[in-house]
Amino acid sequence: MLFDRFTGICYISFAMDKSLRNLPSVDKILSDKRIHCLEEDYSHDFVLQGVRQHLEEVRRHIAKGVPLPSFDQMVESISTLVNSLAQPNLRPVINATGVILHTNLGRAPLSREATVAMEECSRGYTNLEIDLDSGKRGSRQVHVQSLLCKLTGAESALVVNNNASAVLLVLSALVKGKEVIVSRGQAVEIGGGFRIPSVMRQSGAKLVEVGTTNRTYLSDYEEAITHRTAALLRVHSSNFRVVGFTQSVAIDELTPLGERYELLVLDDLGSGCLLDSARFGLEPEPMVQQSIAAGADLAMFSADKLLGGPQAGIIVGQGSLIAKIQRHPLARAVRIDKVRLAGLAVTLLHYLKSEAETKIPVWRMISASVEEIEERAQRWCDLLYGAASVIEGESVVGGGSLPGGTIPTRLVAIKGRGSVKDLADKLRCELPVVIGRTEKNLLLLDPRTVLPEEEEALLNRLRNILNN
Ligand SMILES: *Cc1c(COP(=O)(O)O)cnc(C)c1O
């Protein structure tokens, strides 16, 4: 073998060959007592896969010049790997970001009552599609239909998988092959691939954009109406705001125009708020009741944004239209399951019983006073023995509702000993997972989005990390 004095390549590959030669065989590892013990909990094949996966990783490390670990270290790593592979990857996360509706963190946390109903309905059988009075086949929609009608003033309602499918379903069932007029400022992308022009194309409807990016008048809609026009669609510009020289047409101005030309007026509300957000010091978010009262034929909205329920898409409005939508083949493809239906029904009941603000976590978080948050933040700091301090900040409603809507809050700011990135990484990579915000050299935690029952676990984690 040649030795290159300048690069030392031969020497490295020699060391590598030696390490690879000393790599224990799969059989040798499998016959170790500690690995054998794993087969009490897991199948032989599962353990074997873990062994192979680890050996593969060690080989890759050796190629990069990392020395061969000891046999005991490898056995330990394999046990950890096999045990972790057997854990579900989707797990609870403590949201200390201060973003109340965080799409990446699963949007709305549910009320205790809603989760109990979901658990009960998933454990056994339910009267999902059976009418208990007559014993005959029923519709799964009845469990939420009348609740939605009472709360929104609509004639009928239909619940599907999510709001994106609600919009696609409505357009496909009612206006396929026809023209739909949308303000140019509302032909938006909501995020996660939901773009009004693409959804429109997918449904087979033709998008006719009117007005300009910042200003659209009622006359713009009227001038675009032809014999091919079937609907006027309003879309809530959920996650952005056009400020300054702007003009848009409100839903109660669109409905008389729709009536005059016999066009459907459809309202994609996005978040679909049932409470008056202005009462909480926020900008007014369009309410479902207002849309129906203004005469919209159909309004579509999410159940897991400001409504505070499980993921679902809700369509409310005219009974004859809902019946037609329900018969479309897509309705079956995007139908809701029994578990979320159970959670949604209980969430809607909170509104009916006027207890939304106290029972639904999203509204509890929004309505928590800054004094209340400050008190919690101060208590956290006290329990962290001076490793943190309370500073002023802003919580965000998020989730495509109330764009730019923030709520004054208090943050727990932690400096830590190492880099703030290391601290955030540690909190994110071990159980229970905690996600905060980092800003410059500080880790910021907002008590507003941390559920009271999560506090103890969060503080224990922090104390452990800060003391080590
Ligand atoms: C969020 C949103 C959607 C998509 O709703 P999902 O429930 O996430 O499918 C559609 N339209 C608007 C205006 C939205 O804000």
Image (cartoon, rainbow, N blue to C red):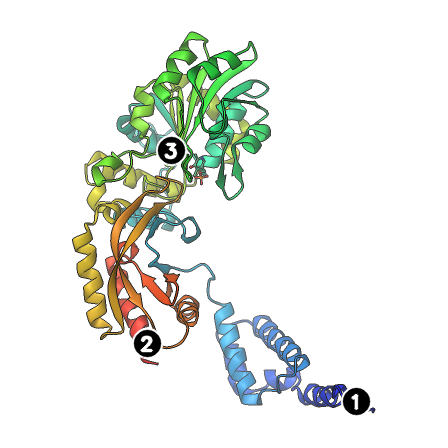
Dot 1 falls on a residue whose secondary structure is loop
Amino acid bearing label 3:
Ile
Residue 139 seen: no
How many residues crowd around disc 2 within 10 Å: few (fewer than 14), some, or many (20 or more)? some
Q: Is residue 312 left or right of residue 86?
A: left
Q: Is residue 9 left or right of residue 369?
A: right
Sequence-wise, which precedes: disc 1 or disc 3? 1
Task: Name the residue rendered at 21%, 37% in the picture.
Answer: 279
How many residues crowd around disc 1 within 10 Å: few (fewer than 14), some, or many (20 or more)? few
Give the residue pinned by disc 1. Answer: 4
Residue 356 lies in quadrant? top left
Amino acid bearing label 1:
Asp
Mark number displayed over residue 466: 2
Sequence-wise, which precedes: disc 1 or disc 2? 1
Q: Give above or below for 251 relative to 16.
A: above
| 280 or 140: nearer the viewer | 280
Residue 204 lies in quadrant? top right
Q: Is residue 395 left or right of residue 172?
A: left
Location of residue 360 in the rendering, given as x and y in whole percent from the top left corner: 26, 45
Task: Name the residue rendered at 31%, 71% in the picture.
Answer: 462
| Image quadrant containing the N terminus | bottom right
Q: Residue furthest front?
A: 245
Mark number displayed over residue 426: none
Give the residue pinned by disc 3. Answer: 130
